[in-house]
Image (spheres, rainbow, N blue to C red):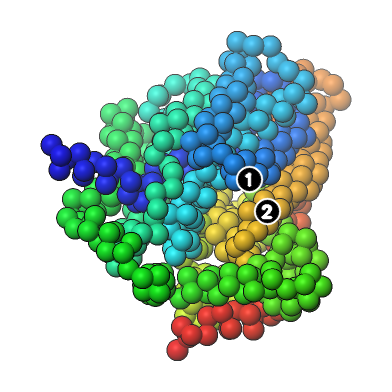
Amino acid sequence: MGKLAERLRTFSRNRWLVLVAAMWVQSMAGIGYLFGAISPVLKATLGYDQRQLAALAVAKNLGGYVGVVAGTLSAALPAWAMLLMGAAQNLLGYGWLWLIVDDRAPALPISMMCVLIFVGTNSATYFNTASLVTCIKNFPASRGPMVGILKGFLGLTSAILTQIYAVMHTADQAKLVLMVAVGPALVAIAMMFVVRPVGGHKQARPSDKKSFMFVYTVCLLLASYLAVVKLAQDFLRLTDNVVKVLTVILFVLLVSPIAIPVALTMTSKSELSMEEALLSEPLTAESSSSQEEGGHRQSILTDVEEKSKDTDSLPQSERRNRRRLHLGENFTMMQALVKADFWLIWVSFLLGSGPGLTVIDNLGQMSQAVGFRDVHIFVSLTSIWNFLGRVGGGYFSEIIVREYGYPRHTALAIAQILIASAQFLFAMAWPGTMYIGTFLVGLGYGAHWAIVPAAVSELFGVKHFGAMYNFLSLANPTGSLIFSGLITSTLYDYEAEKQAHQHQVTGLLSPRLLQSTGFLTGGSLTCEGAVCFFVSSLIMSGLCIVGAGLSLIVVHRTRRVYADLYRPVRT
């Protein structure tokens, strides 16, 4: 019994168990990506027009990406408290929204509805911050792969919840809003005492590479499986039993990474003695071992921290002058804000992620405009491609940096060209372009969230990375306000009003006839045809190309910095 209890204690403190629990939390933290599926429900039940939906989308994006409060509290509160606060916000915001949609509570003014959406979606910043900060502490020498995996699982939320909704086999679309309110909160509460720092720097092993490869394999299997399942559900009439079996297999894949901490606990018989040996070694030997296990990236981060400590002891004027000269050191937020490179990265991020997020937010209207009635398939597929983009973006940008010594923004320029191509396809509205376009948008948009944070940590240091990450995240709601709130919604409503006027035939058609022909849905005008998003998609395509150009300027300006950082590993 004593041996079993010791095994259980070792298992509970395994850093891979914490990572797996954080992956599960993250798999429910991407509730913002479900807005494309619930926006038609809001439009139909509350009679909103496209501008009002765009206002809700902006509130959703502000809630999902303004993490200043969560970032500040994370320095003072434990991870469990962060997860509990996020669960409470999620239940409050989306729970109240469900009561309104299900006609259990009176509708609120549009301004208060924006507040509800903001509060509910802002819960994701608590989940995200708690998971990332904890796992960075547990995996100090493997930040790149770990962050890419966690950000990838963030993109799976809509695919998972819409699959559960399919199992329920109900025509009540308000149930989807209920799942958004309850699902993430339950997972966060269940995992809040598992996600915590466990001294992971003492648990580094040569087998970590194999463990990461196993997780990457699970990620690829998940993405492939979900894509096949969603396409099968779209093109084939599957029975309820088949859908249930497919959902069980999905959950088996989600749970499968737990095999890593289980296997490590069962096979490491001498773990305690190894830890005691490490603790008893001299400090110099410990630092040498950590450098070997951490690899070249850890040595880079260590060098940066040492330089920062050296400069911190200098007078303020000399310290300012020295930091101005060297990208790669630990910049403060104010020092970063006066660097042209930081603003180039921010504007490029806005021009790339903004059009991608606009597509995600308007998938319901875009698919309905070209004749699709089931919008959930595109929301789910985009979630899958977003997941692949985050995992793959981090993986391939790492290859570009480590093996070729090129700046990480090379990969970002490629991702922005993918989004520009997708926007052009949406404008043309050829047969099959919704599938191809959502694939390209998901990959390109997801890659932004793996590439940009890593690049900023390399160029401006890790000491004040939290503040810089939150500032960069503001580019997303800013892009949504510009591209969705001002450009897309205005042009959509203009085309919808023009079509309704043409079909009204000088007042001879009643609103009931307009509703039966599809031009009036739930009291609001609906646009049909490729013309609805033609001009806005072309505008966003052009701006994505501008963003790619800015990324290439960043590549040119930071080429020497990356060559210095990664020169020892180049052949």
Q: To which residue does mark 2 refer?
A: 467
Q: Which picture quadrant has residue 540?
A: bottom right
* Mark 2 surroundings: few (<14), some (14-19) or many (≥20) residues within 10 A: some
- Which mark is drawn over residue 423? none
Q: Secondary structure at mark 1?
A: helix
* Mark 1 surroundings: few (<14), some (14-19) or many (≥20) residues within 10 A: many
Residue 513, x across and y down, in percent: 71, 20
Q: Is residue 458 visible?
A: no
Residue 325, x across and y down, in percent: 74, 79
Work out whether mark 2 precedes mark 1 in sequence or the reverse, and give the earlier one: 1
- Which mark is drawn over residue 71? 1
Q: Amino acid at mark 2?
A: Ala
Residue shown at 79% from the left, 69% from the top: 316
The reply to whether discs 2 and 1 touch (Cβ–Cβ < 8 Å) is yes
Residue 562 to residue 170: above or below: below
Q: Amino acid at mark 1?
A: Gly
Which corner quadrant holds the N terminus?
top left
